[in-house]
Image (spheres, helix red, strand yellow):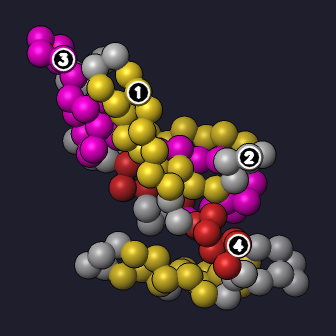
Amino acid sequence: MARYRAQPGGHILQIKFVKKSFKLQVSGFPSTIAKVLKPKEISIPVPWGHLAGRQWGNSQSGKPILALHGYLDNAASMNGLLPLLPLAEYNIVAIDLPGHGFSSHLAPGMTYRISD
């Protein structure tokens, strides 16, 4: 169980991680704030297909942050960390790198070298 206090005298957010489904059960916040905690699935068109990703936080006026996963991982690795941040202040986008998660694979002949 993780706890996060939004502001002095404000609501306390309690997040319960359900291991098998990786769902967040949110309590203690108004429903409008709880909606910010759930990621929005996004798709970014690129010449070889699309980059899949997830967006958390305030997409209207939040400070933009791009979250990148490690090699052979995917954007879902951010599911446990990002809801613990003050999402009302940030617009965080985590993408699946090409060939990872739900993103399109690179065109034939292109490589997935770590140095790239």
Amino acid type assigned to the residue bearing label 4 in the image: Thr
Q: CA distance from mark 1 to mark 2?
A: 21 Å
Residue at left 18%, top 17%?
107
Residue 105 placement (x, y as % from top left) = 20, 29
First reached walking from the N terminus: tag 3 or tag 4? 4
Q: CA distance from mark 3 to mark 2?
A: 34 Å
**Label 4 neighbour load within 10 Å: few <14, some 14-19, many 20+:** few
Q: Which residue is mark 3?
A: 107
Amino acid type assigned to the residue bearing label 1 in the image: Pro
SS at badge 1: strand
SS at badge 3: loop
Tell me, for residue 60, which label it has, or none.
2
Provide the residue span drawn in magenta: 83-111
Q: Is residue 24 above or below residue 49?
A: below
**Label 3 neighbour load within 10 Å: few <14, some 14-19, many 20+:** few
Question: Who is closer to the viewer here, 42 or 112?
Answer: 42
Tell me if residue 23 is in the magenta stretch: no
Tell me if residue 85 is in the magenta stretch: yes
Tell me, for residue 28, which label it has, or none.
none
Amino acid type assigned to the residue bearing label 3 in the image: Ala
Q: Which residue is mark 4?
A: 32
**Label 1 neighbour load within 10 Å: few <14, some 14-19, many 20+:** few
Instruction: Specify the quadrant that holds the C terminus.
Output: top left
Q: CA distance from mark 4 to mark 2?
A: 14 Å
**Which label lies toward us, 1 or 3?**
1
**Label 2 neighbour load within 10 Å: few <14, some 14-19, many 20+:** few
First reached walking from the N terminus: tag 1 or tag 4? 4
Residue at left 67%, top 48%?
59
SS at badge 4: helix
Q: Is residue 6 above or below residue 98?
A: below
